[in-house]
Amino acid sequence: MEAMTIQWFPGHMAKAKREVQEKLKLIDIVFELVDARIPLSSRNPMIDEILANKPRIVLLNKADMADEAITAQWISYFEQQALHALAIDSQGGKGTKQIVAAAKNMLKDKFAKMAAKGIKNPRPMRALIVGIPNVGKSTLINRLAGKHIAKTGDKPGVTKAQQWIKVGKEMELLDTPGILWPKFEEEEVGLKLAATGAIKDAILNLQDVAVYALRFLNQHYPDRLKERYSLQEIPEDIVELFDEIGKRRGCLMAGGAIDYDKVAELVLRDVRTEKLGRLSFEKP
C-alpha cells in the first residue's frame, strides 16, 4: 500500500489565518471547536499564535462518540495549559448549555471594568467559533441560537455579509464560522482525520485508513474488535484480519474472493457510527 499524502495548502492556511484575525477585532471570546476523539489532530497547529491573547474556551465536540475516561484526561490537559475546556455534543445538545455560563464567567472582569467606567447596560458578549472543516461549527451555531440559521454542510469559506446571531440576551455569535485547516504533514494526523470522517473519503485510499483503524483497535480496544466481528483471536497479519472480517460479513466478489474495498468501507462505517463503542484515537 502506498504511503498516503494529503496536500496541505500553505496559501489556504495563510488566508484562513488572516480572515480569522480580521474578525477577532470584533470579538470578546473565541470558542475553539475540536473533535473529542482526536483533540490534537483536529486543531489548527498555529491556533495559539492566531488567537494570541483572546479569551478562549476549547469545546471538545462529539464527546458522545469519544471514550469518556480519555475525554476527562483531555480536559485536564487543556486546563494545565491554562485553557478552559468543555465536553459537548452539539448534535444532541449535551453540554451546550454550559457554554454561555463559562464565557460569562471568563469575561466578568472585562464587563465589570466597563460597568465601572459608567457603561450601563453592557452589550452582549461577542463570540466567534473557530475550527477545522467538518468539526460541527454550523451545528453548534444552530444549537446555541436555537434555530436553523447556519447552513450546515456548506462549502468551507463561503461567507455572507457579517451578521450577529443572538444567543439568548447575553451573547451574540459572529455568524461566519472561522475556518482553519488541520496540518496534514504527519501521516498519522491525516489517518486520524480520515478514520473519524473529518476528511472526505474520496481524498484517501480507504484501505489505508481501514488498516490504520484496525491496527489501532487491535492495540487499544481488542475486545471490542473481537466482539464486533465474532473473532476468537485477532490475526497478527493485517491481510488475514481483512480476510476474516470479509468472510464473516460476506464482503465477497464473484468467485468468492474477499472484496477488500468493501471490508474497508464496512470497518470505517462501524468506527464512525459507534458500532465499536465510543473511541478516542488520541491520549494527552
Image (cartoon, helix red, strand yellow):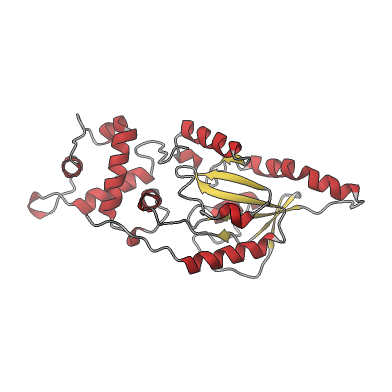
Answer with the quarter of the image where residue 267 lies.
top left
Q: In the picture provided, is 70 more to the left or to the right than 162?
A: left
Q: Quadrant of the N terminus?
A: bottom left
Would residue 155 be visible to someone looking at this image?
no
Horizontal arrangement in the rendering, residue 171 relative to residue 9 (left or right): right
Instruction: State the count of labels.
Output: 0
Q: Residue at x 58, y 68 (%)?
A: 159
Q: In the rendered view, would you say 133 is above or below 100?
A: below
Residue at the location (60% across, 66% down)? 18
Q: From where the camera sits, is residue 122 visible?
A: yes
Measuring from the top left, give residue 21's x and y in whole percent: 64, 62
* Residue farthest toward the right in the current orientation of the protein: 118
Nearer to the camera, 101 or 34 = 34
Q: Would you say 254 lies left or right of 234 here?
A: left
Q: Quadrant of residue 235?
A: top left
Q: Position of residue 178 (x, y in %)?
A: 58, 60
Residue 103 position, x and y percent, is 70, 44
Q: Residue placed at 51% from the left, 53% from the top?
A: 45
Q: Residue at x 30, y 57 (%)?
A: 4
Between 184 and 153, the residue placed more toward the observer is 184
Report x, y in % for residue 143.
Answer: 60, 50
Q: Looking at this rendering, what residue extends furthest in the left direction?
A: 255
Viewer-closest of 175 and 194: 194
Q: Is residue 250 left or right of residue 157?
A: left
